[in-house]
Every structure is written in C-alpha cells, then in structure tokens.
Amino acid sequence: MEEKKLDINSVIGFVLIFGILIFMFYQNRPTPEELEAQKAEQEQVQEEQGEGEAQMAAVPTAATLNLQDSTAVANYKSKLGAFGFTQPSDKITKLENDLVSLSISNKGGQIVEARMKQFHTYDSIPVYLVKDGNASFGLSFTTSDNRVLNTEDLYFEPSLTENNGNKVLSMKAMAGPNAFLEYRYEMKQDDYLVDFTIRSQGLNGIIDGSRPVELQWTLKGLRHDQSVEYENRYTELTYNYEDDKVDYLSVSGDDEETEEDVKWLSYKQHFFSSILATNKSRFKTVEFSSKNLVEEESKDVKFTKLFSSKIPMELVAGELAQNMYWYYGPTDIKVLEQYEELGLDDSISFGWGIFGWLNRYVFTPFYTFLSSFLPYGIAIVVMTILVRLAMSPATYKSYLSQAKMKVLRPEINELNEKYKDNPMKKQQETMKLYGKAGVSPMSGCVPALLQMPIFYALFMFFPTSFALRQKSFLWADDLSSYDTIAELPFNIPFYGDHISLFPILASVAIFFYMTMTTGQNMPQQPGMPNMKFIMYLMPVMMLFFFNNYASGLSLYYFVSNLITIGIMLVIKNFILDNDKIHAQIQENKKKPKKENKFQRKMREMMEEAERQKKTGKR
C-alpha cells in the first residue's frame, strides 16, 4: 500500500506543478478596479507635472514642426534658446555592416530603425528591433534660462567618417559655433556591438547643473514569433548590477525596480536583444519598469512588453562625458560570449542555481556539438537518447524499489487489515517489516528527485536555444515554435487556434508511461484521488500546455518517454526477477537487522506514542 501512496503523491506533485505554471501564465490580468486606479494615478501625475512645467518656458516639440514653413522654423529655433543654432532637417544617416543596419535620425540624434540583416520573422519579414517609433532615446535637462528640453525634440548635425576601417557617425546638437551636445556612434565590421558616447563641449553655463539631467530609454518589443504569448514568456528586462549580479523584472506582469551601480540593461525580446551597456563608468542608479502588453493569444497583437529606463547623468565641470555601447542582435550564447568583458552572455536566462548551470555548461555545448554534424531535429533525438541512457541507472533503482514493494504488498495488506483500527500500530509494524526485509519506501523517490534538475534544465534549454530558431524537422517548420498540422476556425481557451502534432504524440507517450507506472493493480483508496482520472488528466494537461510551446520541447518529451518505456520494459522482462527479489527479501528477514540512530529514535518515539495512547496520556 505504501508503494501506491508514493506513486499517487508523485503524480499529484506533477499535476500541482503544471497547474501552478498555467495559473502563473494566465492570472496576471488587471481587474477593472486596478485599471481605474492606474488611470486615476496617471491623471494625478500628469496634473502635478503640468503644474510644475507651467512655470517653465514652453518649447514646442520637433515632431509637430513643419520644416517647409520658414516662419514656424524661425519661431521654433528662437524658443529653443541656445539650441536653436542647428538647422532643422529630416535627414536619416545609415550605419551598417553585414550583420545589422542602423538608421539614425537628425531629429533626436537617435536610432530610429535597427534591422537584423541575417534573420527574418516567422512570416518572412526582416527582424526589426526598432521601427516605426516603437523606441525612443533622449536626454532631458533644464537650461540656465529656465527651458526644459529633451534631445528627442532637438535637431543634430551628422558627420560620417572612418576610423581604422570603422564607420564613425557624429551627431551634434549645436548651441553655438563651438558649443554642442554630441552623440557619437562607431560601428565595427562584422560586429553587433556599437561604441556609443555622449559628450558635450561648451555647455557649462548653458545647461543648469543644479537640476537633474536624465537619460530616458523606452522600447515596445516588436512581435517576431507566431505565438505571441509564448514569445512574451521569454521577453524580459534583465540587468547587471553591483558585483556582476544579474536580475530581471517580472515576465508575467507589470513590474518596476531601482538599482545602483548598473553595468548593462537588456530589453530581451526572446531571441533578440537591445542592450545598453557601459563598463568602467557604470550607471550609478537606474529606474527600470516593464509593462505587459499581451492579454491574449491573437494574430493582431504587434507588441509584447513596454520597457523603460531612467538614468540620472552626472555633469563634470558642467559637461557630459559617458562612454557606452549599443547591442542590437540575437540572444545567442555564441555571439554574446564574444563580449566577455561586458558579460552580456549573462543576459540569457538559463535558469537558476544548478538548473542554469546544467543548461549553460552541459546541455547547450553538448547540443551545439551534436548539431555541428547532425540535422537539428536528429540532434535533439540523439541528445535525448544519450540523456535517458545516462539516467537509466536511476530508472533501474526506482523500478527495483517498486518491484520490492510489490513483493511485500500482500504482507502490507495483512498489516493494514490487522491494525485497521490502530493507525499508529499499523505504521509501527509496517516500518518493522521494511526493516526486516531491507526495503526503504523512500528509495524509489531519491532517483526521481535526482532527475529533477535535468528535467527542469532541459525545460529551459529549448526556449533559450537560438540554434533551434527556424530549423525544420519532419512536419515542423520551426523547432523553436509550435508545429501545425491543422488550423482551427475558432480559438479554444488555453489551447489555441491550431493543432500541433508533437504535443499529441508526447501526451500519448506520457499516457502509456503512466499506465505502466501507476495504472496497474491500483485500487481506489479512501480519501485518495482516482488513479484512472489522474492518468487521463495528466496527458490532457500536457496537450494543452505544450500546444503553443516549442516543437523541439515536445519532440524531446515524446522521445524521452518512448525511451523510458523501452528501458522499463527491458528492466521488467530481462533484468529483474521477481522470484529472486522475493527470495532475497525472505533471506534479509532472517538476518539480524542493526538499527542506526535515526531508526532507533523513530522506533522509540512510535513506541512511546503507542504507550501514551494505551494509558490515555497526552
């Protein structure tokens, strides 16, 4: 009977795990009351800001300026004060190499388009990280004549040169013949990392140093995957702070945080990242915020999350000087490891603790090795086979424990019947039987627990493996996204509007595995869940859970369960001998069993409890 309880507990544990995961993925939707509260708070903040800014000189934004209207341009320049020195222009300057193309606008001097030249989305559109105003970057400051300005509204003068084969773009917002604010971009050949410097000259006395100068960077993550909810689960804001600690904001809901001594901040859009980094001159403080923009799975959703960061900038002798880097590129460990000094590879979420260690230093390089000479889908199958074979000793020990418990089942049933009215005595006699037979009811659980780190590490491996992106196998067009064998004319809640075959195969394999491990000779016990119901529920939950997940993950679970079933059949039919096990248990019963301190203490406690029960003491 103990064996059955353990199996039931294990199944219940898995059900709870997946139930909690599903609950976490779909619970974080604001209520109407929360939306009203947020609206009221925003209105209050806007009102307070309006009262404060009313005292400053009003400056029109460049976005509303008609460059063809000479009078409007003249009025605009006069209201900018010293920064009206630059002639407005809508010119766009491109910096590009074989990997990435950046478009920098005269208005704001900022990157208004970042395009990956070697990658495209699921619908064959080039991958854009910045496009059509989804991102903004600028400095806000107050001038000595009481004007509140933002560089997004200023015009910059471009100058494109070369430096040792690197393309250098200098964008200057002029405040006089020799006074300017400069954004300097330097792009190397065949490199995603762009050197970026903010500096000023001759602005001491023009910028009011007694008031804050703040760098603001916002970005709305553009959708790149066919399942926006799946992509959104791995879209997050991560950052490196203090002694190279790495943390992130919530991936399931809205979140905000303030940290000190920040080295880099990454707006990770699943398989692609936009990163602003520094090295020696770290950011003293950064205010981060992340807002979830995905409410449901829909082909009409264009954005995943809204990221924002505010960074106070320091003036030195009234001037700005900050060396930084821009990274617009893939969230690929092979690429990010090239920037070891910055530690950008730590922006990839491999998992925490030992799970992340296994994923990063074992499974990722192992799969990279296999996929270097095998097709990507075959590499998954081979890796799964080798992992399951490496774990087969644990499977053997677990199955051996089940076999021993099965041999003892008749005697345990007798004890349960004999002491059915005395649970304490029943437990005491059962433990004695285990001790005499040399059987531990926990011996089957330990191997299963040892496999959990591998299970979770592989669960995190597939969503983080850039190598799987848009790699096909059999009917799956993309192993990093779901496979589709049929489109549905309607949407099923928690399932989707399509049918994926790999999750179906994985669910069928899980059903047969559970039939072998928990479905045989499992009578219904009072107060315990019906095992047949659990056997049907688990595969259905897996089917719903993985329908929008990476097909590579479903392929892994399908192959893994098939191999486990095969290993268990071999162990059952060719390795274990129930008669020998029974004989060994009977032989163990004849030998005097020496108790260890823990066993003796447990026996004494149970005997004392039994005595107190008989005497009526408490």
Image (cartoon, rainbow, N blue to C red):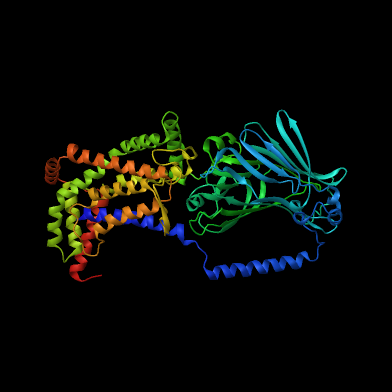
Place of residue 383 in the rendered image (x, y in percent of width and height, measured from the top left): 37, 35
The image shows residue 77 at horizontal and vertical percentages of 85, 53
Residue 546, percent from left and from top: 39, 50
Query: Residue 172 or 241: which is nearer the viewer?
Result: 172
Q: Who is closer to the viewer here, 579 or 363?
A: 363
Quarter of the image with the N terminus is: bottom left
In the rendered view, does 235 fall on the left or right side of 425?
Answer: right
Looking at the image, residue 375 sits to the left or right of residue 69; the answer is left
| 105 lies above or below 150 | above
At 15% from the left and 55% from the top, the residue drawn is 412
Q: Relative to residue 325, is residue 484 drawn left or right?
A: left
Between 21 and 434, the one lying in front of the other is: 21
Q: From where the camera sits, is residue 330 visible?
A: yes
Task: Tally the marks.
Answer: 0
Residue 441 seen by the camera: no
Q: Is residue 543 above or below residue 92?
A: below
**Which x, y percent locates residue 13?**
33, 55
Q: Please, is residue 42 above or below residue 474 in the view?
A: below
**Quadrant in which the C terminus appears:** bottom left
Q: Toward which corner of the image does residue 587 lie, by quadrant?
A: top left
